[in-house]
Amino acid sequence: MSALFDLTGRTAVVTGARRGIGLAMAAALADAGADIIGVSAHLEPSGSAVEQRVLAAGRRFTALRADLADRTAVHRLAANLNTRGPIDILVNNGGTIARQPAADHSDEMWDQVMEVNLSSQFVLSREIGRGMVSRGHGKIIFTASLLSFQGGINVPGYTASKSGVAGLTKALANEWAAHGVNVNAIAPGYIDTDNTQALRADPRRNQAILDRVPAGRWGRPDDIAGATVFLASPASDYVNGAVLPVDGGWLGR
């Protein structure tokens, strides 16, 4: 492996690591040499799919449970992580979505989506990023979305939160780049995960999406792997505040 992409000896935290994009991100980082601390509300203490992938790569895996909708739990998680030695890479991937037309989108839906997708990620970035800044190096990667650029349909809270993630990425990069901390985001396109099941189950929406994607297919979680390793590695040391689409060409259409 090129030294540019070698993560040997690094420790990476990946939230939302139990399945989907988070699992693929954790596995890719492990394949590049990083030890993984996986975080999810329902992550199994042992034997999870993500643990199996990380161990198969010959790396260490630690499972932590935390509900990102619970601010107190997020603070406890951050304190726990800061006792585990230097965190080199923080992947803020954990997220949720609530589909409801804006006129019927309740306060409860809005508050939960914003807490999980934006507020918890700021708290973790601040608490883990402080140590990165003091050490003079670190990588923070957010999972943004195509809806960081577009409005979407029936997901006002999700769109607002992911637009916030794009802005937060740039704001933190502006403050921390000079301290050796790279803050960037990946904006996945339409990926075959639980979050998009409703779209794929709707024949008209499914076909409309496929017709718009130049690559002609739904993305797979593993399509996010290369971008994750790039933004976590020395190869991206002069990349700051970027929101990188991995979308099969959707935004270029």
Image: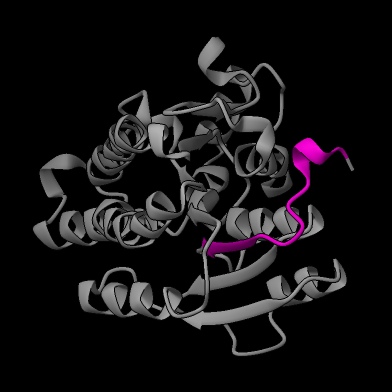
Display coloring: one colour
Q: Foreground: 106 or 244?
A: 244
Asked whether 8 falls inside the magenta stretch, the response is yes
Q: Foreground: 21 or 5?
A: 5
Residue at x 60% of width, y 53% of height: 21
Residue 13 percent location from the top left of the image: 54, 64
Residue 171 percent location from the top left of the image: 28, 33
Q: Quadrant of residue 27?
A: bottom right
Magenta region, residue range: 2-14
Relative side of 244 to 115, left or right: right
Q: How many marks?
A: 0
In the image, residue 75 sits, relative to residue 253, either above or below, namely below
**Could one spot residue 240 in this view of the protein?**
yes
Q: Quadrant of residue 174?
A: top left
Looking at this rendering, what residue extends furthest in the right direction?
A: 1
In the image, residue 191 sits, relative to residue 106, either above or below, namely above
Residue 98 percent location from the top left of the image: 31, 54
Residue at x 40% of width, y 57% of height: 95
Quadrant containing the C terminus in the rendered view: top right
Q: Foreground: 197 or 175?
A: 175
**Could one spot residue 219 in this view of the protein?**
no
Quadrant containing the N terminus in the rendered view: top right
Asked whether 126 falls inside the magenta stretch, the response is no
In the image, residue 137 sits, relative to residue 54, either above or below, namely above
Q: Quadrant of residue 229?
A: top right
